[in-house]
């Protein structure tokens, strides 16, 4: 785009923030990742009740109709934390045969100024990252803390544990035996709000694990919860 291009509204910006059309079927899947953020000066931008909202939409390239909405992030006086999502793997079962586009939708209720910059960074794009699997109809945003039953269960030797957090913060996810002895730490790091999944491989645990019941426990802020899972060799 021309550096002198005038962008007077969020509608002008949206024209540049969509992908080229691509084809999907019921057997397809696609990956996407995106980053939103704010700097330390955003406190002076928002007045009372003012907001800036970003959504990732999957739209029909032929009709411009909305198929699904994924990330939906709102910045205001109460939320100015930088946000960087995971990489999402979208299963498109149920979509049929369609030509689609991904687009970033922007909404605000104040006199915001906009600019667009083209940035190429292969090191970031290709870097190893966590990945969340979702389907069409699944909003990737989390509104409550939760940890879900692992699958498969029983398992041997690998199983997947999914959890979600509605706020940015430290997350610890550990596995214990039934005597309360720690087996392994699966997660111990700062996470942005959203849905996550992690694979537990019993064969990688120190000393190996015998068949039986095990407990996985998540802690994030004041939230703590646990569930049981069964290793069956």
Image (spheres, rainbow, N blue to C red):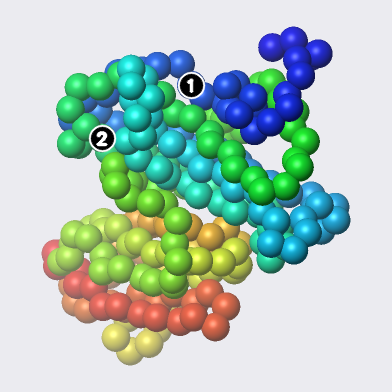
Residue position marked by numbered label 2 in the rendering = 92
- Which quadrant of the figure has residue 49? bottom right
Instruction: Please say whether residue 68 is visible from this viewpoint.
Output: yes
What percent of the width, then of the height, locates residue 178?
A: 29, 86
In what quadrant of the picture does the C terminus appear? bottom left
What percent of the width, then of the height, locates residue 125?
A: 57, 30
Seen at 53% across and 60% down, the residue is: 193
Question: Is 208 displayed left or right of 173 in the figure?
Answer: left
What percent of the width, then of the height, locates residue 106?
A: 59, 39
Q: Which mark is residue 19?
A: 1
Seen at 33% across and 21% down, the residue is: 63
User: Against 66, is 36 above or below?
Assistant: below
Give the SS element for disc 2.
Answer: loop
Name the one closer to the observer, 133 or 232.
Answer: 133
Give the SS element for disc 1.
Answer: loop
Seen at 81% across and 52% down, the residue is: 45
User: Against 48, is 55 above or below?
Assistant: above
Question: Is 51 displayed left or right of 70 in the figure?
Answer: right
Q: Which mark is residue 72?
A: none
Which tag, 1 or 2, sits closer to the chain's start? Answer: 1
Give the class, few, some or many, for how many residues have Cα within 10 Å of label 2's Cα (few <14, many ≥20).
some
User: Against 58, is 85 above or below?
Assistant: below
């Amino acid at each position: 785009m021309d550096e002198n291009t005038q962008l007077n509204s969020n509608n002008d910006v949206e024209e540049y923030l969509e992908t080229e059309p691509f084809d999907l079927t019921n057997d397809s899947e696609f990956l996407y990742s995106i980053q939103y953020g704010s700097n330390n000066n955003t406190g002076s931008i928002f007045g009372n009740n003012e907001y800036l909202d970003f959504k990732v939409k999957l739209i029909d390239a032929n009709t411009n109709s909305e198929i699904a909405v994924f990330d939906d992030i709102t910045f205001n006086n109460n939320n100015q934390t930088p946000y960087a999502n995971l990489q999402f793997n979208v299963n498109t079962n149920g979509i049929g045969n369609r030509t689609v586009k991904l687009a970033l939708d922007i909404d605000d209720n104040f006199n915001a100024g906009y600019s667009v910059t083209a940035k190429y960074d292969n090191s970031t794009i290709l870097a190893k990252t966590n990945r969340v699997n979702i389907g069409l109809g699944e909003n990737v945003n989390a509104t409550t803390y939760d940890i879900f039953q692992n699958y498969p269960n029983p398992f041997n030797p690998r199983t997947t544990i999914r959890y979600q957090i509605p706020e940015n913060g430290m997350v610890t996810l550990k596995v214990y035996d039934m005597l309360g002895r720690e087996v392994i730490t699966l997660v111990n790091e700062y996470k942005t709000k959203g849905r996550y999944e992690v694979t537990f491989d019993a064969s990688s645990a120190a000393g190996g694990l015998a068949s039986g019941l095990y407990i996985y426990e998540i802690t994030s802020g004041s939230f703590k919860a646990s569930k049981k899972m069964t290793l069956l060799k």
